[in-house]
Every structure is written in C-alpha cells, then in structure tokens.
Amino acid sequence: MIFVLVHGAWHGGWCYRKVAQRLRAAGHEVYTPTLTGLGERSHLMNRAVTLDTHIEDVVNLIRWEELSDVILCGHSYGGMVITGVADRIPERLRALVYLDAIVPASGQCLFDFVAPETAQAMRDDARQNGDGYLMTPIPAAVFNVNPADAAWVDRLCVKHPIISFERRLELSGAGEKVAKRTFVLAPDWPPPGTPGLVSPFLEIAESLKKDPRWRVVTVQCGHDLMVDKPDEVAQVLIASA
C-alpha cells in the first residue's frame, strides 16, 4: 500500500519518522512531505504561504511521484490540507485518515474550530512574535507529548503562518468520492491543569460516530499520537485501507 502522511501546524515530515519506519518495515511505500515554510523547508517561509500552498504541496507530490490508490493521512491542521487535496484529486486516493484532525466543510477555516479567545491569542502572538504573520509553536508539554520525546518535538517545531488558519476552504464536493474515511481520536489532550484549553477533536469525533461513512477509533495518548503511539497509528493506517 502507498501512504502519504501530512503533518500539522508547526511540525514537519520529521514527526512521522517512527510511523514511517514501521510501515516501511511492513513492506509499504511511505511519503512524509514537509509543507512549505516548515521543517527543513522553513527557509521558504514568506507571507504568500497559505493553506492553498500546502494543499498544492501534497497534490504535486502525488502527481509528480505518479501515485495512485493512496491512503492519505493528515494530523491536526493537516486535516484541512488533506480535505483540500481530496477535493482536487479524489481519483488518486483510496482512503482518508484524520489523526486528531480538523474535518472541515466547505467555507470553513481552522479558526472556526477553536474558541474565539484562543484565536485572538494566536493573532496577538503573531503580531508580537512573528513579524505579524507567524504563530509561535505550541510547546510539546501543552500537546501532552510523552516526556522522552518532548524536547525533540520542541527543538524541531517552527513558526507557522497564521493565514493558513484564517483561509476558508472552498470545496467542490469531489472529495466525497473517497468513500473510506477514518477519524482517530487522541483523548488525552489537553493535559490536566490547562484550564480554558478545549480540544475540538472530541466534538468532531462524536459527530462523526453518527455518520455511517466514517470509522472512528481511539488511541489513548496526547495530541501528537504519531509521536507517542507509532505502533498503534501504523496499525490504524493499515486497517484504514
């Protein structure tokens, strides 16, 4: 099987390292693209980088690698990206997997899924700490990453363009042709002792449980489940096909 694994905000393709190792060991083909302006491509960050740029990153990877029958996975913000990709090239996809990820409808942006005060705090941060357009990485401890990997995650995360959270995703509906859909909930986020922080993914999971098109599973860990539980995530990905 062919897997394309899309990371979330502030991260890069590096965050799937453990999952990719397990999938490749099982004989599968795996791609872990890093979105423009992040990870090893952080030198390309500029004010023109948006959600549309990130969708194009993944569409072009699939087209230029001439991939088909792809299992496309997105984590967190990556759910916005893979939804856009599915709308563009549904004929290339076999299944969609959302890892504790946003599942948007047409016309929605990521900020529609967070509390207004959280969105405002991110905008304030971008003005003060990111040249007006870049959000400071959320610490790994806030995402409840396991202590052994928290320093690694903090070291490699970089600032993320706020416009990608503000850009509304306009969909044609073509992505509905991808029939196999899995949502993976990581319920141990936010961690205890973080008042005011609410996970949007609990509500998304509950909503999708009512939709017969979706398979909803739980991996017991914090938000960065591909870091914390790579064995379980690899198993879910294989089962999603």
Image (cartoon, grey):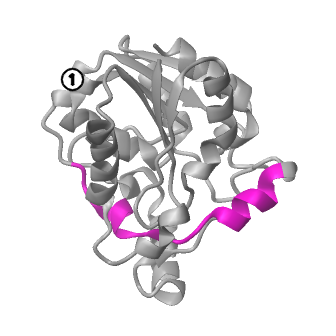
On screen, residue 199 versus residue 164, left or right, reads right
Start-end of magenta stretch: 149-169
Q: Is residue 60 magenta?
A: no
Viewer-side residue, 189 vs 116: 189
Left or right: residue 88 versus residue 19 is left
As drawn, 147 above or below 173: below
Q: Against 139, is 203 above or below?
A: above
Q: Please report the residue visible at 55 percent of the width from the left and 16 percent of the height from the top.
A: 238
Q: Residue 226's image quarter?
A: top right
Task: From the top left corner, tell me how far across and down residue 231 is, in percent.
Answer: 72, 25
Residue type at mark 1?
Glu
Would residue 161 be counted in the magenta stretch?
A: yes
Can the viewer see residue 37 in this picture? yes
What element does badge 1 sit on?
helix
Q: Furthest residue to the right?
A: 148
Image coords of residue 227 (percent x, y):
70, 42
User: In the image, is residue 146 above or below residue 42?
Assistant: above
Q: Looking at the image, which is closer to me, 67 or 51? A: 67
Any part of residue 193 in sight: no
Q: Nearer the viewer, residue 225 or 70?
A: 70
Residue at image point 26% right, 56% down: 52
Between residue 77 and residue 33, name the one nearer to us. 33
Q: Position of residue 63 (x, y in %)?
A: 26, 38
Instruction: Write down the residue under mark 1.
Output: 91
